[in-house]
Amino acid sequence: MLIVQKYGGTSVGNIERIKNVARKVARTRDEGHEVVVVLSAMSGETDRLVSLAHEITLSPAEREMDLLLSSGERVTIALLAITLNSMGYPSKAYTGRQVGIITDGIHTKARIERVAAERVREALNHGIIPVVAGFQGISEASDVTTLGRGGSDLTAVAIAAALKADLCDIYTDVDGVYTADPNVVTEARRLDKISYEEMLELASLGAKVLQNRSVEYAAKYGVKVRVLSSFVDGNGTLLTGEDEDMEKVVVSGVTCDRNQVKVTIVGVPDKPGIAGKIFGTISDANIVVDMIIQNVGQESLTDISFTVPRADVNKTREIMAGLIKDIGAHELGIKEDIAKVSIVGVGMRSHSGVAATMFSTLAAEGINIMMISTSEIKISCVIDAKYGELAVRALHRVFELEK
Ligand code: ADP
Ligand code: ASP
Ligand code: MG
């Protein structure tokens, strides 16, 4: 078999752990498989690099941020290839550019346009284990780009798709996908399998065990993905197509996303074209808006609230300052201490009363709901950040996810 193995930050957090990864890769080779390895930076390294830049300015040039952040993965791939070579397993490390991960030019959240992977194929043909830097690519203009936080998962899936690999194993610090973050809810249960669609929602709503775009990409190209622990052996969780069993379960998982902030524009003139102008300006800056609420207007003025990624808060603040004057709105408010709790499950399509149960459960805990959004298979509520964990536990209990 051809297997792509991706190891996350904790799994390569120090030399001892890199040696552990090398032993796992070597074992897979010894079993007769071809292996391509994709690595993250050491845990904490990407955050450390972000804070270095933030010591200089809160709105650093994004092209240079990408160059800076991509350096973390160079360190780990080189160290792993050095380890494998010293163990007698020929290996070569490659950056995103060297393996031809071609992206668009949207810095800090570039999208993959194509994957050449010629050098990876060439290495495999010569019995060399390729070790690829996750999270990074190269734009048509030859600038280094990054794929958004957690983007090494996407690198692994994209390489697996390009090579038509039999399996893409994501090794991390938990032994699979759980009904809730196992580090928050001790009763959370590991799922043997989960549908791509549910996993995509969970990942998009805060379950960082897989990056959301990696799940989208895996579904699109039919990549067989497993989530496993790099520290303990086990079967992990397999991403599969939906089946009948899954429909029977109303809620499959609960998540909490702390990576959004709420922006409110107070006193917006209530007339046609204003919303288009606000959200057009934001989208021109490549900021993705999630939830939107517009209050009922009074005296031809209204308030509009929406959420944007925390990473874009400074950029949003700058853009909004100009826009507020432009459209004649009164003021801008940004609330950073919010959390978005969500329940996800394909069974919601065929069960009623799920939203009511969610709202009354939060109410019973004294938690106020600031914003709500729903889709066919998920319900999300924005609440005060300090109640995030409490809400996740209460929802996990009421929908009996531990069973
Ligand atoms: P890596 O560095 O290996 O990419 P991440 O930190 O990105 O690892 O993702 C693993 C973490 O995801 C776990 O430590 C866990 O706290 C968190 N997590 C959140 N939700 C879930 C979930 N539903 N199932 C498993 N892990 C989850
Ligand atoms: N090192 C990057 C990050 O911390 C990418 C990854 O770990 O997947 O976001
Ligand atoms: Mg990750």
Image: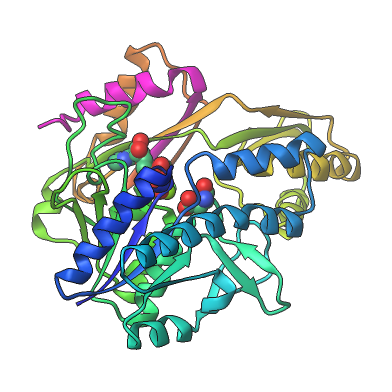
For the point 57% across and 52% down, the residue is 72
Is 355 left, or right, of 242 in this rendering? Answer: right
Is 73 left, or right, of 165 in this rendering? Answer: right
Say if the magenta span includes residue 390. yes
Vertical arrangement, residue 176 with respect to residue 260, above or below: below
Task: Name which quarter of the figure residue 27 lies in.
Answer: bottom left
For the point 88% across and 43% down, the residue is 322
Question: Can you say which quadrant of the picture contains the C terminus?
Answer: top left
Q: Is residue 4 shown to the viewer in this render?
A: yes
**Numbered-mark total:** 0
Q: Is residue 205 shown to the viewer in this render?
A: no
Which span is picked out in magenta?
Answer: 379-403
Image color mode:
rainbow
Q: Position of residue 290 (x, y in %)?
A: 55, 46
Which of the two residues, 236 or 388, is positioned nearer the viewer here? Answer: 236
Which of the two residues, 110 or 94, is positioned nearer the viewer here? Answer: 94
Question: Can you say which quadrant of the picture contains the N terminus?
Answer: bottom left
